[in-house]
Image (cartoon, helix red, strand yellow):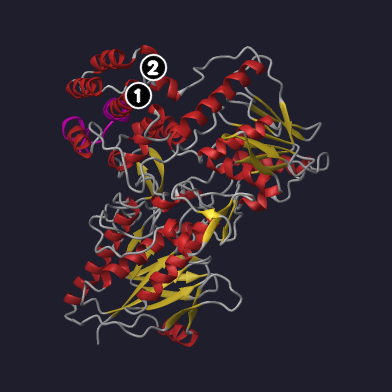
């Protein structure tokens, strides 16, 4: 009788779905794996992760519908055979979703057809994830037993080689030979400063009952629901989380936008339930740039000439520092990246403004010939498009140029012009507009950026500089909200509901006489402090294992099974892993029976929190495939070592996938008697 191998996945969000998809694709290829029992630990809806199906419909996904998929295709290399399945766009069409122009809501069977470039609600994306998880598990149960536990894992203990015990909230123990950690976004403990603010706020609520400080903005609905029309709110941050909060404080309160003349200009119609004022501020004082109209289709990408994987490898070989051949981002990498962005910018500018093929080819030849001579590139760019039209990275980094504005009116005029220019550029598109095309290069070469950063690819100091100085800029210019959100922001400003004119690097103080916060920027002469009742920090928790509230994580750190990732003296976040995604324990040894994937390893890996995209060899799908192939190879080797060969045949499973009677999303219906016997008998070796 072949050995039964117990495999546990802790967290079946999007990364967990990628794993079961790859398991289904590959399990029939390895025909001597013995019997497999898959344990899935997921307290929420299967597949959804943070994209819960019950969140407000006003919260949108940040990628167009046609590009999102949870299935592999022929572009995915090294992950096993592709399994066909619908992308998000195909799935919503099959489900009958439409867009109702009047209510600006996505509904079934009412409204216009959904466009491939629509940004859909995250709740609908969650439904797609949930349906995908069930579809895959329904097929997978032909080949292995599946048990789902709708609760949290609270501890993991190593008993020996490929022997682990996972404990759940109800004290259930799941014996496991292999464990995958795909727990997704974490919630961190409050910082000392946040604790101090909350303590003082609680002491001053007798003066102002509306006084509040929110350090964790999710779930957004729980944060915004208590806010009423007699409160003034400040939001710290201009990014995607701020966009969610603004949406819920306006659309979520019954307000609506209507087109005012053209699609680049909206008018906001308030409901009267909104807060009386919404202040938005940040260190830079700059809103995120809107995502330009997608002109690249499903899988179109800019093809780099300079910033390539081969170029990075050459840099490592020739200029890498130390035994690891680490690079310095500013000295080694940034010049190549900027050469690529500038090249894209000028080529796009020439196509848009001059439309002279000879001039375009001349510029291209000269740029490529002189790519290693920065001074020559400046001259070539000047000759092609003129100094006034140049690609100016310093202005992109700091559009305000550290200037002190003489008045609030001057600052307001500058920032409104900045927003309107961004709206115009966004509607031109990510291929046609020079600046938007150049910024979109950052998305298209992200895998090359990963090759620079992953597994301590930069020196510790350069890694820190990249994450604190350059990463915020890249996020601001290339992964902002849909362009329509910027149009909405402008409408809210014109409606005198939103105020973004506080200034940069503001001072924030708690007035103990009035029981309110005062916020005052530093780059505006004579700026009036803004007074608010509540501050909401619009930032998600960074991946910091030592501060993670998870009982599972804290226990694994304490027993030395996991340890925080460090690049030298720089703490980048996440847990330490080897290149096969095995966590490295406190003794510096790889735990071969464990795997970690997704945001839990954000630090050793770079940009793990994206959803897979069709047709581009998505890293999320590739990494999931590598882990599953490693798992099956390990099982196969173990079977050979034990000299127990068996064919792997489809079999009747102890689980079934059935809809609930109340119409709720599908969940797995379990044979509890079988599960109980499995749990009590332990590993069947």
Nearer the observer, 105 or 375: 105
Nearer the observer, 602 or 308: 308
Residue that label 2 marks: 389
Q: In this view, does 680 lie to the left or right of 102?
A: left
Q: Say which quarter of the image contains residue 396.
A: top left
In the image, residue 99 above or below residue 155 = above
Q: Residue 349 carries which label?
A: 1
Q: Say which quarter of the image contains residue 446.
A: top left
- The quarter of the picture where the C terminus appears is bottom left
Q: Give the range drawn in magenta.
A: 317-338
Q: In this view, does 384 lie to the left or right of 247?
A: left
Q: In this view, does 521 lie to the left or right of 650?
A: right
Q: How far apart are marks 1 and 2 (CA)?
A: 9 Å
The answer to if 331 sits in the magenta stretch is yes
Q: Do the residues labelled 1 and 2 touch (CB within 8 Å)?
A: yes
Number of other residues with Cα within 10 Å of mark 2, as a class: few under 14, some 14 to 19, many 20 or more? few
């Amino acid at each position: 009788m072949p050995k039964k191998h117990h495999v546990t996945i802790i967290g079946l969000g999007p990364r967990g779905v990628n794993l079961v998809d790859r398991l289904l694709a590959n399990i029939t290829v390895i025909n001597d794996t013995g019997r497999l029992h898959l344990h899935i630990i997921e307290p929420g809806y299967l597949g959804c992760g943070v994209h819960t199906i019950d969140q407000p419909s006003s919260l949108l996904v940040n990628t167009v519908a046609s590009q999102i998929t949870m299935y592999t295709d022929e572009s995915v290399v090294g992950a096993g055979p592709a399994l066909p399945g619908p992308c998000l766009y195909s799935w919503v069409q099959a489900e009958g979703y439409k867009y109702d122009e009047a209510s600006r809501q996505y509904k079934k069977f009412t409204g216009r057809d959904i466009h491939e470039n629509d940004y859909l609600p995250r709740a609908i994306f969650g439904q797609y994830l949930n349906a995908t998880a069930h579809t895959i598990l329904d097929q997978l149960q032909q080949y292995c037993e599946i048990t789902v536990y709708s609760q949290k894992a609270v501890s993991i203990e190593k008993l020996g080689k490929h022997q682990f015990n996972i404990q759940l909230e109800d004290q259930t123990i799941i014996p496991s030979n292999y464990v995958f950690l795909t727990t997704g976004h974490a919630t961190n403990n409050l910082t000392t400063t946040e604790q101090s603010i909350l303590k003082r706020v609680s002491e001053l609520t007798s003066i102002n009952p509306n006084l509040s400080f929110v350090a964790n903005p999710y779930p957004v609905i729980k944060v915004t629901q208590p806010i009423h029309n007699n409160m003034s709110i400040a939001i710290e941050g201009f990014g995607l989380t701020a966009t969610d909060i603004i949406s819920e404080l306006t659309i979520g309160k019954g307000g609506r936008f209507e087109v005012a003349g053209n699609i680049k200009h909206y008018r906001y119609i308030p409901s009267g339930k909104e807060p009386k004022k919404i202040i938005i501020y940040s260190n830079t004082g700059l809103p995120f740039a809107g995502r330009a109209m997608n002109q690249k289709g499903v899988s179109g990408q800019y093809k780099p000439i300079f910033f390539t994987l081969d170029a990075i490898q050459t840099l490592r070989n020739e200029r890498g520092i130390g035994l690891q051949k680490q690079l310095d981002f500013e000295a080694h990498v940034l010049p190549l990246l900027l050469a690529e962005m500038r090249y894209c910018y000028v080529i796009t500018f020439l196509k848009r403004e001059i439309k002279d093929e000879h001039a375009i080819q001349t510029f291209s030849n000269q740029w490529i010939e002189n790519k290693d001579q920065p001074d020559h590139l400046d001259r070539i760019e000047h000759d092609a498009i003129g100094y006034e039209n140049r690609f100016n990275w310093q202005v992109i980094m700091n559009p305000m140029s550290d200037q002190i504005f003489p008045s609030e009116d001057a600052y307001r005029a500058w920032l409104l012009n900045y927003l309107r220019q961004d709206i115009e550029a966004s509607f031109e598109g990510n291929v046609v507009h020079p600046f938007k095309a150049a910024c979109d290069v950052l998305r298209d070469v992200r895998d090359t950026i990963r090759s620079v950063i992953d597994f301590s690819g930069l020196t510790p100091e350069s890694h820190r500089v990249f994450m604190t100085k350059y990463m915020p800029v890249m996020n601001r210019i290339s992964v902002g909200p849909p362009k329509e959100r910027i149009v909405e922001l402008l409408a809210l400003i014109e409606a005198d509901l939103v105020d973004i004119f506080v200034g940069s690097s503001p001072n924030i103080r708690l007035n103990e006489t009035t029981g309110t916060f005062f916020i005052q920027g530093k780059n505006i002469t004579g700026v009036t402090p803004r007074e608010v009742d509540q501050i909401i920090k619009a930032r998600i928790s960074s991946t910091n294992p030592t501060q993670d509230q998870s009982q599972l994580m804290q226990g694994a750190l304490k027993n030395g099974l996991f340890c925080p990732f460090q690049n030298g003296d720089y703490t980048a976040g996440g847990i330490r892993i080897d290149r096969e995604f095995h966590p490295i324990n406190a003794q510096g040894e790889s735990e071969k029976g464990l795997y970690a994937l997704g945001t839990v390893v954000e630090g050793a890996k770079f940009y793990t929190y994206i959803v897979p995209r069709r047709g581009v060899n998505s890293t999320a799908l590739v990494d999931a495939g590598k882990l599953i192939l490693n798992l099956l190879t390990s099982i196969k080797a173990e079977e050979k070592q034990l000299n127990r060969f068996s064919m792997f045949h489809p079999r009747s499973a102890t689980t079934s996938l059935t809809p609930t009677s109340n119409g709720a999303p599908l969940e797995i219906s379990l044979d509890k008697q079988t599960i109980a016997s499995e749990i009590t008998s332990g590993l069947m070796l």
